[in-house]
Image: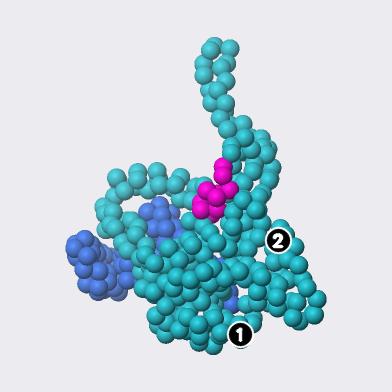
Amino acid sequence: MTAPRARLVSSLGAVLLAVACTNSYEIQIETPIRPKLDVGAFQRVLVAGFLAGGTDDVDGNLETTRLLRSQLRTKSELRVIDSDVLPLMDVASEERTNDSGQAAAPAPIKDQKDLEGFEHVFANVEYWKKIGDEYQQPLIVTGTVMFTPLQKNQLVQREQEVYDSFGRRRVIPIRSYQERKGFSLDGRFIFIDGRSGTTLHSETFAEQVLYSANQTTPALSSYFELMDRLIPSFLSTLSSQKIKGTRILLQ
Amino acid sequence: MRLAAPIVALLVGLAVAPLVADARDEAKKQVEFGIRVAQRSLWREAIFWWERATKSDPTYAAAHNNLAIAYEHEGDLPKARQAYEKALELEPNNAMIKQNYELFKEINDRTTRKTGQ
């Protein structure tokens, strides 16, 4: 639970008490959120592929492409193009080979720095224009995905029962540093105009999840847990969203 | 002569008090009507009544709070923020207004977070 969310939950009790004492009415609202990007010029969207790295347990390129396509199919008005996922890593490596005249063998990509050497592919207007022409000039979604294992010592609070000399039970909070393991998901979504090959918009993200060290969580389920947090922001870039909520009207 | 100033102030206060009470009564009626129409999902109508209420009595925090909610529902987030901030300025310790504002900020931050070209 994040700190603002914890504050929100703790204040809920006070609010409920106040609601009972004053003239107030709970009401459902739906807040429309306008898309960050004007996609009126496009009828189709191509989630092309991603430069991906980190753990070998999850293919960040394939999984991210599949997930975003399926989300866009149900939650966007744009028609999603089904195509093979672009091996962007290879494309970027080839470009490097052409530029320097030497073969650049793609080394294992373990962190964000390793990826930086390949990101020039996003600035290759000709390449993206060619892809755009191939698919009837859609909006192209691409970017970077770095999904890496994480290990941290974190302050954890637990409650412990103690009994005094009269046998009375008390619960006291005990704080201690504990080893936690999990994953981080960092990267960037890039939106490219398939007509010109130029970047229209880009959006960086960074999320992480930590579990107790003795808990075994498959990498793929952690990946989906983290992507779930990013999807609303991703979708709100392309299509208008309605966020349901409850507010209190006062008299 | 020394008593003149306090007496004048008292008289002015007595004369203005009913006007202030009238303004609040008027605003309360408008707020109440706005609530009734909002409960029937007539949000534009509710905005009309709550805007009138804030004009009738600009110090009525409930009217600003309700107006903020209606703006939020209509997707006018800058106006919603302004109205919430006015409501909190008038009643900084009102837990319900604070709660509404926190929820609003969560949505507003989501629309603006971590973007860049």
Q: Which residue is mark 2?
A: A109
- Whether residue A226 is visible here, answered yes or no, is yes
- Which chain is cyan in the picture? A
Q: Is residue B63 magenta?
A: no
- Label 1 and label 2 in one chain: yes
Q: Is residue A222 magenta?
A: yes
Which residue occupies 35% across, 44% down?
Answer: A17
Q: Secondary structure at mark 2?
A: loop
Q: Which residue is mark 1?
A: A125
What amino acid type should be assigned to the residue bearing mark 1? Val
Q: Secondary structure at mark 1?
A: helix
Which residue occupies 39% across, 67% down?
Answer: A73
Which residue occupies 52% across, 69% down?
Answer: A84
Assess whether mark 2 and mark 1 are in contact (beta carbons under 8 angstroms). no
What amino acid type should be assigned to the residue bearing mark 2? Ile
Q: Is residue B56 above or below residue A52?
A: below
**Quarter holding residue A164:** top right
Q: Is residue A11 above or below residue B116?
A: above
Tell me the distance, in whole angstroms, between the alpha carbons under discs 1 and 2.
24 Å
- Whether residue B7 is visible here, answered yes or no, is no
Crowdedness of circle 1 by 10 Å Cα count: few (<14), some, many (20+)?
A: some
Classified by dominant secondary structure, the portion drawn in magenta counts as helix
The answer to whether B82 appears left or right of A251 in the picture is right
Magenta residues (range): A217-226
- Which chain is blue in the picture? B
Chain ID of residue with mark 2? A
Work out whether mark 1 precedes mark 2 in sequence or the reverse, and give the earlier one: 2
